[in-house]
Image (cartoon, grey):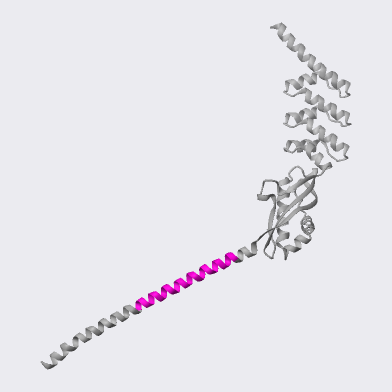
Amino acid sequence: VVIIVLLVLFVLLINFFNLWLQAWLSGAYVNIMSLVAMRLRKVNPAVIVQSRINAVKAGLHISTDELEAHYLAGGSPVRVVQALIAASKANIPLTFQRATAIDLAGRDILDAVQTSVNPKVIDCPSPGTVPGNTVAAVAMDGIQLKARARVTVRTNINSLVGGATEETIIARVGEGIVSTIGSSASHKEVLENPDKISKTVLKRGLDAGTAFEILSIDIADIDVGDNIGAQLQIKQAEADKQIAQARAEERRAMAVAREQEMRAQVVEMQARVVEAEAEVPRAMAEAFR
């Protein structure tokens, strides 16, 4: 048993020695006892050492204690360091504290930095969210238009914590498209100048309170849909027809009822006449008597 324990300790020391040597040769010195303490605190020393080496090689001054604290908090030191390196190369101001806060908030800090450097395109609406993947709206002349937009955004790192996500951008752009088309006097105006939608939507500052900055909104496609105005008129005419038919049926029923009432009155009068005629002989007999 003692031999087995000694072998285990020897293997562990070899592993710690390799990490210590790797860090020392890379210029990111880490005390070997710190590596042992990391293992006792259930921290992966390899992750901390590799992250510190990457940071030092990139000219970043991040201590092992800071990396270890972030690891224990449930964050990813590797992603944070990679994001800081990318931000440093792109001259984007980003501190270790802000990067760790973004990482612990559940956002992908590395993807955020990359999106800040290389803006990405968001489809509006998102594929598969609505039938036909288009935003449908009706102009004032009753013609339906179906539009699809592509929104170019880049990450606003300062608003990443607490800022709204892509879904908010998509919803706001969709609402702006519907509002712009709906306020157009004719669908032809929109077809002739699709950039009218882009300009109108961009003026609204749709990226306020979000984690992104909208760079451009481009109308990728716009098609003519149904004649909603005509359909509504047809439905209105059908409803008016049904109302007229109901009223005519009501008048007919009242006429039939009135006719039946008059017939009843005639029958009653005839009965009275017959009754009166029956009294004549009786009166004559009484007179002769």
**Residue at the extreme left:** 289
- Please name the residue shown 41% across and 74% down the image: 254
Pick whichever, 19 or 37, lies toward us: 19
Q: Quadrant of residue 75?
A: top right
Q: Quadrant of residue 116?
A: top right
Horizontal side of residue 191 vs 228, given as left or right: right
Looking at the image, can residue 164 be seen?
no
Give residue 189's position: percent from left, percent from top: 76, 63
- Please name the residue shown 85% across and 28% down the image: 54
Give residue 181's position: percent from left, percent from top: 72, 60
Looking at the image, can residue 197 be seen?
yes
Residue 259 lies in the magenta stretch? yes
Give residue 103's position: percent from left, percent from top: 75, 36
Pick whichever, 4 or 32, lies toward us: 4
Magenta-drawn segment: 234-261
**Image quadrant where one finds the N terminus:** top right
- Please name the residue shown 29% across and 80% down the image: 267
Q: Quadrant of residue 13?
A: top right
Give residue 244's position: percent from left, percent from top: 51, 71
Residue 187 lies in the magenta stretch? no
Query: Up-down: is 141 above or below 257?
Result: above
Query: Up-down: is 18 above or below 230?
Result: above
